[in-house]
Image: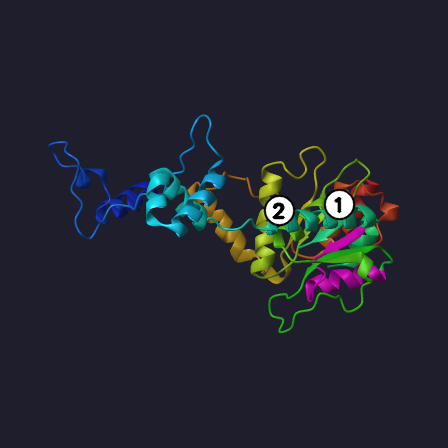
Amino acid sequence: MAAAAPSSVVAGLVSGLGLARSSLTPSDGRSPSLSPLHPPWPAAPRLVCRSSGARPPRERAVAAAAAAANSPRQQQQLGEHEHEEAVAAAAMEPERSSPHEVREEIARCFDLVRRLGRGAVYLGSSRIARLLDCTTWSGAGPGFMDAATQGALEAGKPVGGFKIGKEAGEWTTSNFHPYLPSESYLTCRFFSARKHGLVDAAVRNCPTDRTAIIALPGGIGTLDELFEMMALIQLERIGSTLPVPFLLLNYDSYYSKLLDFLNDCEEWGTVAPGEVASLWKVCNGNHEALEYLAQFYNVPLAERNYCISPQLKQQATS
């Protein structure tokens, strides 16, 4: 039996729930009557501004609230509009400070990237830092992030990070890295600021910049960053002028099921054929990743500080 098209399935669901237009509109064209189980939506308070000679809405609302506290007669004299504005003003939330705090934190992230320089962003290997001669960036956390940090330090290359107080799987919260100097990382309160910092670290400003995005095995947070980076590359918010290599490290087939899912998306038509493959390079190991980056940036063979595969040697000498 052939599977029904997704649009028809959704249409059937809507119809079955009694939300189809035909079930709400009587045959004679009259407006449908609502049952007691479906009361009408409550009317929202109106904010009415007079065209001339009127006080600002907030000022009138304050006056209305003060009058209402004095006597019911004064409340009636102010009229219906002022009373509604007083109710609306009382329901308004105070101004939030988080947008300003996020903006300030993003500015600090950008300043850290400016001081340490752009480079390879890990979403871990000293060889990449040495090969590209760049700064290594990560979430400055444990696991693979720490492997990237230690590898870069062993290679004698700069390290930067945007950490959060508590990573998934950790029991305690700490704003401090156990061994990195405080001037090389920033503890972010907001995830949006952390992501802005990692994206800024990966963007190439000139042809001599050698940056990369390396997605290592991880959990929900890694997948979140992985797909956001992919979307930014897809929409040309990253790499529109100078392309940035995006590598998916599929160690021990860790991401194979994810790749199968994305292939299924192509079959369903939600992703264009070849679209995902054009956004990143899937590598099964470090050697494959290093060779891809070396070829991407045309690194001379003499500067490739890793064991070159026999196939590449043959291509270079032929």
Q: Position of residue 121 (x, y in %)?
A: 72, 51
Q: Residues within 10 Å of mark 1 (few under 14, many from 20)?
A: many
In the image, what residue type sits under mark 2?
Answer: Met
Q: CA distance from mark 2 to mark 1?
A: 14 Å
Q: Earlier in the sequence, mark 2 or mark 1?
A: 1
In the image, what residue type sits under mark 1?
Answer: Thr
Label 2–label 1 contact, CB within 8 A: no
- Position above or below: 143 against 267: below
110 vs 39, nearest the viewer: 39
Q: Which residues are magenta?
A: 135-154
Instruction: Identify the image's colour scheme: rainbow, by chain, secondary structure or one colour.
Output: rainbow
- Position above or below: 217 against 213: below
The residue at 28%/42% (across/down) is: 11
Q: Quadrant of residue 254?
A: bottom right
Which image quadrant: the C terminus?
top right
Q: Position of residue 171 (x, y in %)?
A: 62, 74
Q: Which residue is mark 2?
A: 229
Per the rendering, the mark at residue 211 is 1
Mark 2: secondary structure: helix
Kindly tell me whether residue 237 is visible in this rendering.
Answer: yes
The residue at 78%/41% (across/down) is: 297
Q: Position of residue 312 (x, y in %)?
A: 77, 47
Q: Residues within 10 Å of mark 2 (few under 14, many from 20)?
A: many
273 vs 116, nearest the viewer: 116
Q: Quadrant of residue 185?
A: bottom right
- Position above or below: 129 against 180: above
- Position above or below: 181 against 56: below
